[in-house]
Image: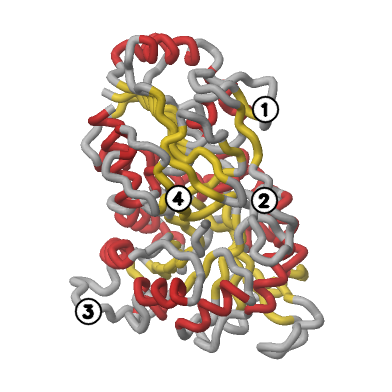
């Protein structure tokens, strides 16, 4: 069973529905200790990086412990950013730190400019696969997925897919059995479901 | 590159899609879930369910409709129409809506935008603005601005669309759904000057609505109108234009779309 951590950063109805659609069973861990039975862990989340402070009380340590034992971990949107050292959005709030780098705000362009790059980045955008990894099995460069965010993770050696919105950023990351997606796979049609299947079955 | 979104709107009353629907091959033309599946197969980027139910009794069907539509749909789903309170919004979100659309309630109680943005995130809060050109006329420069209307276009709110859109953004709205009352149902094209005026005034995406009649209208609203997304209802319901052929047309004209 896959543990879905609900730390009250957004509604999880759609995430639950998407995992149900691919035949993966989820449970709501009541406490960090409840992660012991997790075959895998999903950290979702939307909104301000400061919301991840709710994961400090025991969760981060328990998740790190399960990752060290080889349990797969998937961060979605804010959950991806939390995999990194931290974010400029909430400098006092540390991330899990299993991936190197600090998240930052997309620059965008001046308001009202022609072909303005608006922030937040909302809508469907392309994935450019940077290198093969289990999380992107069956996902081609040019596939589109649904984003809604203002902050991003830097492109590093762990970046599996890159998206451009005025500048390139990490759309999908994977290092060993830790993966993350900046977009919403539960809202990204068949491509999103394929990525969730890859996480549930292949990683 | 970020795609321009094509959004289909389902006007729902008592669990059934209204505004004539005459797709071939649908078992029940008015079934929102079946129509949603059809649009999804055809490549729609997002769906809006607009509840136009008249009575409280009929309104209870809305959650069932949202649940039925959301069940197999893995694209964003927004719900609007009659969302007056935080608990109305919560019921829609719990049933499976990714975004709630506030219109009259936001004008009456702007703090509701902030309350919902804090609870669900700005990405979940869409502020719908129904506006028409002040001083009459359905085209031209609109020198007197764009007057906002509440209660489905029935009463003037005493606000200007550009100024109200800015305030909605400041209060935490994630997107603006801008409908031209002048153009709604006319099929003579979107109000591009009004859309551009709002789109340039805010950083959040602006969804243009009202007036779609031809493929060229969508090209215009994405270029001169500077819209981030365009919404239509009857042009898709009547299968006058398939979503796929619209997107192919846009792509041929250099407008980025999801195909």
Q: Are marks 1 and 4 in contact (CB under 8 Å)?
A: no
In the rendered view, tell whether residue B30 sits above or below residue B108: below
Q: Report the residue marked by disc 2.
A: A108
Return the residue nearer the eye: B163 or B13: B163
Q: Chain of mark 4?
A: A
- Locate the C terminus of chain B by quadrant: bottom left
Question: Is residue B67 something one can see in this rendering?
Answer: no
Q: Report the residue marked by disc 4.
A: A146
Name the residue furthest right: B144
Q: Are marks 2 and 3 in contact (CB under 8 Å)?
A: no
Q: Chain of mark 1?
A: A
Q: Report the residue marked by disc 1.
A: A90
Q: Which residue is at a point 44% across and 71% down the rendered structure image?
A: B251
Cα separation between marks 2 and 3: 44 Å
Q: Which residue is at a point 74% across and 58% down the rendered structure image?
A: A111
In the rendered view, tell whether residue A173 sits above or below residue B163: above
Cα separation between marks 1 and 4: 24 Å
Q: Are marks 4 and 2 in contact (CB under 8 Å)?
A: no
Left or right: residue B12 versus residue B154 is left
Q: Report the residue marked by disc 3.
A: B24
Mark 2: secondary structure:
loop
Provide residue B181's location: percent of width, then percent of height: 61, 79
Mark 1: secondary structure:
loop
Q: Chain of mark 2?
A: A
Provide residue B225's location: percent of width, then percent of height: 63, 74
Provide residue B172's location: percent of width, then percent of height: 67, 48
Cα separation between marks 1 and 3: 53 Å
| Quarter holding residue A23 | top left
């Amino acid at each position: 069973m896959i543990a879905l951590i609900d730390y009250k950063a957004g509604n999880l109805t759609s995430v639950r529905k998407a995992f149900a659609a691919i035949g993966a069973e989820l449970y709501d861990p009541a406490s960090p200790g409840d992660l012991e039975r997790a075959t895998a862990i999903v950290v979702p989340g939307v909104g301000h990086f400061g919301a991840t402070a709710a994961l400090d009380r025991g969760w981060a340590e328990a998740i790190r412990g399960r990752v060290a034992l080889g349990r797969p971990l998937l961060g979605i949107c804010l959950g991806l950013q939390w995999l990194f050292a931290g974010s400029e959005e909430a400098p006092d709030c540390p991330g899990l730190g299993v991936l190197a780098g600090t998240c930052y705000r997309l620059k965008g362009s001046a308001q009202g400019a022609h072909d303005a790059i608006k922030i937040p980045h909302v809508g469907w955008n392309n994935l450019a696969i940077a290198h093969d990894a289990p999380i992107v099995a069956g996902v081609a460069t040019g596939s589109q997925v649904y984003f809604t965010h203002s902050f991003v993770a830097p492109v590093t050696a762990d970046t599996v897919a890159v998206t451009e919105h005025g500048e390139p950023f990490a759309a999908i990351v994977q290092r060993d059995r830790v993966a993350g997606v900046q977009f919403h796979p539960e809202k990204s049609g068949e491509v999103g479901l394929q990525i969730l299947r890859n996480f549930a079955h292949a990683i | 590159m970020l795609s321009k979104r094509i959004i289909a709107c389902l006007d729902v009353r008592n669990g059934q899609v209204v505004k004539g629907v005459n797709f071939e091959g649908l078992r029940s033309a008015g079934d929102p879930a079946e129509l949603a599946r059809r649009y999804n197969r055809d490549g729609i980027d997002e769906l809006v369910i607009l509840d136009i139910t008249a009575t409280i009794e009929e309104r209870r069907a809305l959650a069932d409709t949202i649940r039925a539509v959301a069940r197999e749909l893995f694209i964003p789903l927004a719900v609007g129409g009659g969302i007056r309170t935080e608990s109305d919004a919560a019921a829609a979100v719990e049933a499976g809506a990714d975004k709630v659309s506030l219109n009259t309630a936001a004008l009456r109680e702007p703090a509701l935008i902030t309350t919902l943005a804090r609870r669900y995130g700005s990405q979940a809060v869409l502020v719908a603005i129904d506006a028409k050109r002040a001083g009459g006329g359905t085209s031209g420069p609109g020198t007197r601005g764009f007057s906002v209307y509440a209660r489905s276009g029935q009463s003037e709110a005493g606000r200007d669309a550009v100024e109200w859109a800015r305030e909605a953004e400041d209060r935490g709205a994630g997107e603006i759904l801008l409908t031209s009352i002048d153009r709604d149902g006319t099929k003579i094209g979107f109000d591009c000057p009004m859309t551009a005026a709002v789109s340039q005034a805010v950083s959040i995406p602006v969804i243009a609505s009202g007036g779609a009649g031809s493929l060229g209208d969508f090209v215009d609203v994405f270029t001169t109108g500077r819209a981030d997304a365009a919404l239509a209802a009857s042009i898709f319901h009547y299968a006058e234009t398939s979503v796929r052929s619209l997107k192919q047309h846009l792509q041929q004209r250099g407008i980025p779309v999801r195909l």
